[in-house]
Amino acid sequence: MELTLPAEPVALAPGVPTRVPVQVRNPYARQLDLRIYLARGRAAGWATVEPETIRLVPGQTAEIGVFLTTPPEQPPSSSLVPFTVHAEEVATGEPAGFATALLTVALPVPVAGDMIARPGQRYAYDLRLVNGTGQPASLLVTAELDPPGGALQVQPDTVLLRPGSAVAVGVRAKPKRHLIGTPQKYSVVVKVRDGYDTERPPYLTEVATGTRKPRVSSLFAGIVAVVLALGATVAIVLQGTGIRLPFLDRGKATPVAQVTVGRPYALIDVFPHRGADGGRTAADAALARLVGAGMPVRLVDSLSSDVLADEGAGFWVLLQDGFGTAEAAQQFCDQWRPVAPKCQVTS
């Protein structure tokens, strides 16, 4: 006779019935009529077996339930208590098999809930929490983005949830947005913990997923690259015929001085060369804001560096370099994330 119990310890909550599944298999060539019971001990006084008797034909496997209910006043304990499930033949009382597992009495989980997207608002969610126990629950709500980057706000992040009450926690995300590429998948992972013991495993973990579009799609970037390539080809042909191209002459008259950008570097923001001032006003305003916040940062023309990408007319690039390792650059981004949320490491 083969009996199988869960390999992991069974966690019981005071006064709450817990079903423990028991797999029973008849490996013999004859039919067996069995009675299932628990060996003497503390767990036997808490146990009810359903069904108590079972008939198995040769080779058959079935599942029965052992329901364990501790007294409501049973104090929680981290110690593990063994309990043994026996099977005996109904007709003769002969032992047919047994199996042993472990149990522990833990505090009940005081909160349940789910997270849903907030209608009409991108990257915003409502986490609904309910306390179905008879005790108040102090809760800490935390959130993180996967992959890391961007910004998150949880409000409120601490909650005192009274017995039978419910509350809604607002979660607002701003996933990191790439400059060029395809839409990137992201996850918002929200965890609800014991407000007095944050080292305990979370009571509840909820995950929301979505996608974040880049600033410029790969298709659009490809079209721009093709147009620019055709324009360059036409310019070469026209120059060969002797036709003057004023915009090419301007480029020759004001060459861009080359600057050095060291890898790895922290890419903070990018402003395309466009508009009447070539994007310089917007870049200077962003530079002034960051410098005013105390952040060390450089403004570099992508046309002046072989390290920076300069598709199309080029870019004004806010960056910081001089890091010995990518980890040091990442620490810089993490430090200044509140004022430069787009900061990312380029190696």
Image (cartoon, rainbow, N blue to C red):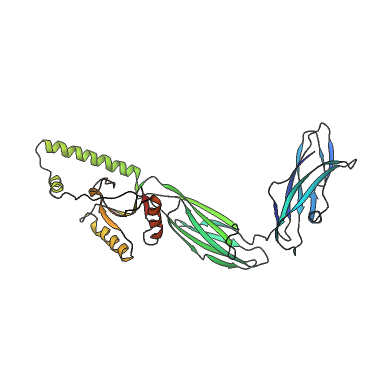
* Depicted 97 relative to depicted 107: above or below: above
| Residue 141 horizontal/vertical position (percent) | 54, 62
Left or right of 122: which side holds 285? left
| Image quadrant where residue 221 sits | top left
* Residue at figure coordinates x 20%, y 40% from the top left: 232
Residue at position x 26%, y 53% from top? Answer: 300
* Farthest-out residue, front: 324
Say how many tags the image has.
0
Query: Relative to 61, is 160 above or below?
Result: below
- Residue at image x 12%, y 46%? 249
Q: Residue pushed farthest top? A: 29
Q: Quadrant of residue 294?
A: bottom left
Q: Is residue 300 left or right of residue 332?
A: left
Where residue 261 sits in the image (x, y, percent)?
A: 28, 50
Q: How far across and how far down the image is residue 69, in percent?
A: 76, 57
Q: Residue placed farthest to the left in the image?
A: 242
Q: Classify residue 197 as left or right of residue 222.
A: right
- Give the residue displayed 76% in from the left and 59% down from the top: 70
State the image coordinates of residue 116 (x, y, percent, origin top left).
53, 56
Residue in front for this viewpoint, 78 or 132: 78
Q: Is residue 261 left or right of residue 1?
A: left
Q: Which quadrant: the N terminus?
A: top right
